[in-house]
Image (tube, rainbow, N blue to C red):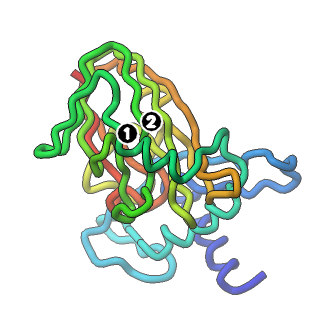
Amino acid sequence: MTRRELVLGAALVVLLAGGAGYAIGQTAGTEPGARPAVAASPGPSRTAAGQPSGMPRESAAGYSNNQLAQAIAHRAGQRLAGSSPGYVSASSARTLDSQVPAGARADAGTDTITFTTQKVSFTVVAVPPGGPDMTFRIGGLVNPALVVPRGAAIRVRFINADDDQAHGWEVTSSGPPFQFGLGPPALPGALARPLGDPTRAGYGTEDITFRAGRAGTYHYACPMPGHAQMGMHGTFLVR
């Protein structure tokens, strides 16, 4: 085992012990093609200081570490490659990330997509081809605010279009400044677990369904450690 693997392994232990969000489990004897487990726990608050290198540095304000976050995501992307529930081609991903969802109104001026029906369906593309790094694209907009009616049945198709990092999508009660890791989803079922790197089959996809049962202001974000801090988040309003 290389020194880098030892350091990264130690970092994952620290993250789990300290409750710093989602980490990719490494389980011996996993069946071929089976999906590694993703564990969830709440994380410490984001530091107001700069981004340190190496292991997380705790302070009164918590910690954040872009270098560690990307190292975890790179390794998770490799380990989760080939285990996604579904796949789409790169051309399909480009088409889907630019389509305004049916029954919705997209306002580029306010970066908002508003749904008015009780059946809501949209596609979320993480790190879309040609788009800004560490962002989501929905309906042709980058990290738009999503407004849905209370009680709506919601279907989300999540696509990870990043070539070398794992990403997921979650509705969370947390908001900026985000912690290094996210806790469980704020609405039951509102979590697309991290998907790995693309394969010959295409970009990994997962479809999830949940209900907007409680009115309020939430956020959607990537549950991989540190990614919400790096820009992968938007507002999710239930009215």
Q: Is mark 2 on a helix, strand or loop?
A: loop
- Whichever of callouts 2 and 1 sits on the residue coming sooner in the sequence is 1
Residue type for callout 2: Pro
> Circle 1: is it few (<14), some (14-19), or many (20+) Cα within 10 Å?
many
Q: In the image, is 126 to the left or to the right of 2?
A: left
Q: In which quarter of the image is the C terminus?
A: top left
Q: Is mark 1 on a helix, strand or loop?
A: strand
Residue 185: give its label: 2
Q: Are marks 2 and 1 in contact (CB under 8 Å)?
A: yes
Residue 54 x/y as whole percent: 50, 82
Q: Residue at x 59, y 45 (%)?
A: 88
Q: Which residue is drawn at 41% across and 17% down?
A: 153
Residue 45 in sight: no
Vertical position of residue 204 compared to residue 229: above or below: above
Q: Which residue is drawn at 38% across and 68% down?
A: 64
Near-viewer residue (204 or 224): 204
